[in-house]
Image: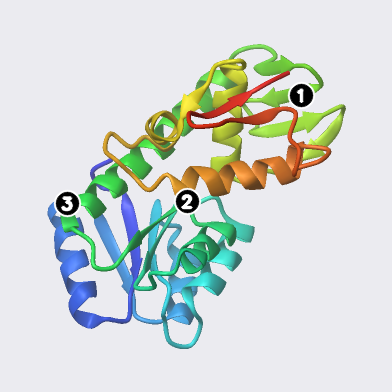
């Protein structure tokens, strides 16, 4: 992962320089932008491996940048937000971010998340290459079919459009259907975190998945909550 291209979009010059210094020290190729429009242009022209995106930006806010990028690419997006309300943090996930960090944050934690996200992306690429060389790389459970090589999901022959993280979460739960996983366990296995993360990230992605795969998301039959424990996938 050394040499990975990381784009930082942040209008606070001091923070931008600190992030650039620490990321460069880790061995990453760092690109920077100080407003949303420039950030979007830089992402489009340079195809980074990871985007660190502030919410409050001039010209175009981080939510809109994230929303546009998510329609165009599967690049991992880590949002930075100074807002403390949970609804504000969730909005970042709802427009397509993979995770978020709330300011002020420790640089050690941020670097750990960056490493985890890049590691997860690299692992997914390797899995896709391996799966593509194996005949019929599909998981079939009930009326769900997951094509691991093409990252496509269908239910009853109807295609289901999922984001990169939604796909990873569903694939993991389907492979282990019937087993219950805590939110921390899912952060470790799906997001690749080897440290305590914000479990709200898991809840939001589960909510999105339910909207896309359940007939009645308010009363899920497949992606089930086990009260006081976590989640499991039932056929």
Q: Quick one: 81 or 228, which is closer to the camera?
A: 228
Instruction: Name the mark on residue 133.
Output: none
Residue found 18% across the figure and 58% down from its top: 106
Q: Is residue 48 visible?
A: yes
Give the residue pinned by disc 2: 98
Image side of residue 3 versus residue 45, left or right:
left
Q: Position of residue 104 (x, y in %)?
A: 24, 67
* Sequence-first tag of 2 and 1: 2
Q: Position of residue 134 (x, y in %)?
A: 60, 13
Q: Quick one: 189 or 132, which is closer to the camera?
A: 189
Residue 171, placed above or below residue 1 = above
Spatial CA distance of label 3 from label 2 is 19 Å
The extreme right residue here reads 157
Image side of residue 162 versus residue 51, left or right:
right
Image side of residue 100 versus residue 151, left or right:
left
Residue found 26% across the figure and 38% down from its top: 195
Residue 222, placed above or below residue 12 = above
Give the residue pinned by disc 3: 108
Residue found 54% across the figure and 65% down from its top: 91
Q: Position of residue 17 (x, y in %)?
A: 18, 73
**Label 1 neighbour load within 10 Å: few <14, some 14-19, many 20+:** some
Instruction: Name the mark on residue 144.
Output: 1
**Element type where label 1 sits in the image:** strand
């Amino acid at each position: 992962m050394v040499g990975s291209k990381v784009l930082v979009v942040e209008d606070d010059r001091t923070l931008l320089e600190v992030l650039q210094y620490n990321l460069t020290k880790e061995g990453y190729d760092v690109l920077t932008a100080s407003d949303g429009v420039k950030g979007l242009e830089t992402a489009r022209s340079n195809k980074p491996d990871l985007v660190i995106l502030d919410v409050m930006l001039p010209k175009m806010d981080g939510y809109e940048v994230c929303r546009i990028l998510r329609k165009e690419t599967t690049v991992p997006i880590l949002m930075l937000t100074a807002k403390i309300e949970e609804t504000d943090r969730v909005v970042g996930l709802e427009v397509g971010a993979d995770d978020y960090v709330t300011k002020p944050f420790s640089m050690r934690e941020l670097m750990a998340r960056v490493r985890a996200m890049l590691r997860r992306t690299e692992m997914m690429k390797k899995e896709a290459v391996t799966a593509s060389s194996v005949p019929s790389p599909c998981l079939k459970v009930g009326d769900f079919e997951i094509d691991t090589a093409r990252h496509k999901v269908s239910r009853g022959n109807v295609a289901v459009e999922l984001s990169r993280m939604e796909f990873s979460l569903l694939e993991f739960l389907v492979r282990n259907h019937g087993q219950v996983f805590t939110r921390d366990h899912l952060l470790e296995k799906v997001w690749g975190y080897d440290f305590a993360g914000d479990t709200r990230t898991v809840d939001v992605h589960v909510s999105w998945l339910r909207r896309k795969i359940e007939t009645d998301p308010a009363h899920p039959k497949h992606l089930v909550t086990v009260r006081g424990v976590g989640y499991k996938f039932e056929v």
